[in-house]
Every structure is written in C-alpha cells, then in structure tokens.
Amino acid sequence: MSTPLDTKIISKLAEILDRTNLTKLEYEDEGCRISLSRGGAPVPPPAAPLPMMPAAPVPAAPAAAAPAAENVPAAEIDYSKDPNAVKSPMVGVVYLSADPNSPDYVKPGDSVAEGDTVCLIEAMKTFNPVKAHKGGKVSKILVASGDPVEYGEPLIVIE
C-alpha cells in the first residue's frame, strides 16, 4: 500500500527552495522520497530583500542589516576560502541554539575551544552538531537561526 503524500511537506520544501539559492532539495521519510529541483541559474540572495525594502519604515535600516547578514559574505567578503570560517558539513537548516528558549551556542566576542558546538544543522529530521575546527574568539556569525544552508557554506568566523 502506498502512503498518501503530505502536501504540507512539499509546500515547506518548495518554500525553502524559493527562499534560498538552493537548486536541489531532497527529502525522505518512511519510504517516501521527494526531490525538488530548480532549473536555470540559482536565484541570487539580494533578490529576496528587495521587495521587503520598500515596505520597511526606514529604508536605511534594512539596507544596513542586509549587508551584515547576507550580502557581506557574498558581495564584499568571500568567507568560503577563509581558514577561520566554520563551514556547513551538510545541506540543511542551521540553528544557533538547542531550542527557541535556549541561548545561542555562541555569539560574537565569545571564546571557543576546538570541538565546542557552535550551532546545529537539521537534515532529514536529525539535528547534527557543528563543532569549532579551532579555538579562538567568535568574530562573526554569518547566518541566522532557521536559515537553509548548503554544504561548505561559511557559518561562523573564529579568529
């Protein structure tokens, strides 16, 4: 007997695909496998904030916030080859704390030791800890909790 597809899951996966520059997303649960892909070039990250800027009461504030969180790594500083950057070991959704009521694992200015958990990546309903690859001081957090991430994407910079 086949299990009916849960359209909520498909909608959520499609929503993640729309919000990110991911080109392919796969999901498997209890014998049901869903694979979504987007043809053509990936949607650039600045495309999402543009419609939101006119709706903002003060255009300067979103413009200042966007480069710090999204555009700085891609447009001005490329952290993908930075040896200080902790990179995502897999495709998934990043979480900066164990649960919504807990404090973040790290914040800028915190000192970490090699092997300390700095965030979690959820993939296939499993939360995987991401560990610091070296000790030092957290200088930047390049993602927000709930952001979809790709393999190798820089997450946190440790100086």
Image: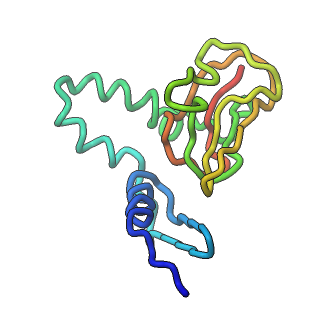
The quarter of the rendered structure image containing the C terminus is top right
Q: As rendered, which of 140 and 72 lies closer to the eye? A: 140
Q: Position of residue 38 (x, y in %)?
A: 45, 69
Q: Residue at x 44, y 52 (%)?
A: 20
Write down the quadrant of residue 7 in the picture: bottom left
Q: Residue at x 30, y 28 (%)?
A: 62
In the rendered image, the vertical position of residue 115 relative to residue 4, given as above or below: above
Q: Position of residue 95 (x, y in %)?
A: 56, 36
Q: How many marks?
A: 0
Write down the quadrant of residue 11 in the picture: bottom left
Q: Residue at x 23, y 35 (%)?
A: 53
In the rendered image, the vertical position of residue 158 relative to residue 36, given as above or below: above
Q: As rendered, which of 10 and 58 lies closer to the eye? A: 10
Q: How is the image coloured?
A: rainbow
Q: Residue at x 59, y 19 (%)?
A: 107
Left or right of 105, for residue 77: left
Q: Position of residue 19 (x, y in %)?
A: 39, 52
In the rendered image, the vertical position of residue 99 relative to residue 48, given as above or below: above
Q: Residue furthest toward the front?
A: 1
Q: Position of residue 130 (x, y in %)?
A: 71, 37
Left or right of 75, for residue 8: left
